[in-house]
Amino acid sequence: PGQAPARVVVVGASGFVGGAIVNLASSRRLCGRIASVLGVSRSGTAAAHPSPCSDARSDVSTTYLALDVLAPRGNDELASALEGATAVIVSVGFAPLPFVAYDKQVRVNGETNKRVLEAAATAKVPRAVLVNAAMAEPLVSLGVVPRGYYDGKMMAREAARAFVDAEPATRSAAVLKPGPVHGWRAVAPGVALPLSAAMVPAETVLRAVASPGSTLADLTPVSVSRVAEVAIEQATRDGVTGYEEFAL
């Protein structure tokens, strides 16, 4: 018999990347592979960003839930929402902006992700996919990438590893490490920036010259549609075990 359709929960579903993941997961392209998609975010609404992953909707059940995992009962509420899910995709965080305080960077990019994975463990979700980031460590040392961003992202990776290590026979995790993500990004109601206009030429050049694992490779842009495709591919893999990291 074939693999049963997946029940996927996307945390961070109103964001740039999370919204693209929800749209792809509930699109006609994946009809038959996914039975239901629950999008979780603080707003509980669909993303405002135009998505290249949208097409005619299938009969996939797609719903949204407003929930703040850092609220006093956030973990319990999320664990309840995750019950019965076959995979959780965690796409929470924001860009490495130099003017954001260290504590806030760690809280959003690290602690929130950790709480989601803890809730997934409580709900006995077998598969976790963490949308993290490539880390150009020399830029962190030089202060170009904020230390709080780096520490938060590394905290999230460690939480994904701990998720697997606690029950290695029944849990698995994939950590995605994209460089700068491009696509149409909403900046105001009805206004979106075409980030690809600047980033696609840079991506083409860097993919041609960057060595795997190098700082240039970490800085190579990737499209939001590619990140969404890999996230769904990893969330719907069957029979995998252990902890894995994937550079995009």
Image (cartoon, helix red, strand yellow):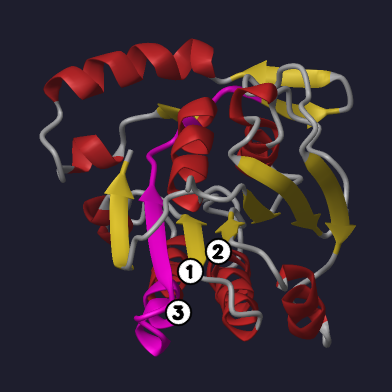
> What residue is shown with label 3?
163
Q: Which residue is mark 2?
A: 109
Three-letter residue code for mark 2: Asn
Q: Secondary structure at mark 1?
A: helix
Q: Position of residue 140 (x, y in %)?
A: 32, 57
Q: Evaluate if marks 2 and 1 touch, with contact meaning CB atoms under 8 Å apart.
A: yes
Density class for disc 1 (Cα within 10 Å; few <14, some 14-19, many ≥20) is many
Residue 79 position by quadrant: bottom right
Residue at 57% over, 22% down: 183
Q: Which residue is mark 1?
A: 152
Q: Amino acid at mark 3?
A: Phe
Within the image, what quadrant is residue 9 found in? Answer: bottom right
Q: Secondary structure at mark 3?
A: helix
Q: Are marks 3 and 2 in contact (CB under 8 Å)?
A: no
* Number of on-image labels: 3
From the viewer's side, name the closer residue of 181 and 3: 3
| Residue at the (78%, 24%) spot, across then down | 57
Q: Secondary structure at mark 2?
A: helix
The earlier-in-sequence mark between 3 and 2 is 2
Split into 4 quadrants, where in the image is the C terminus? top left
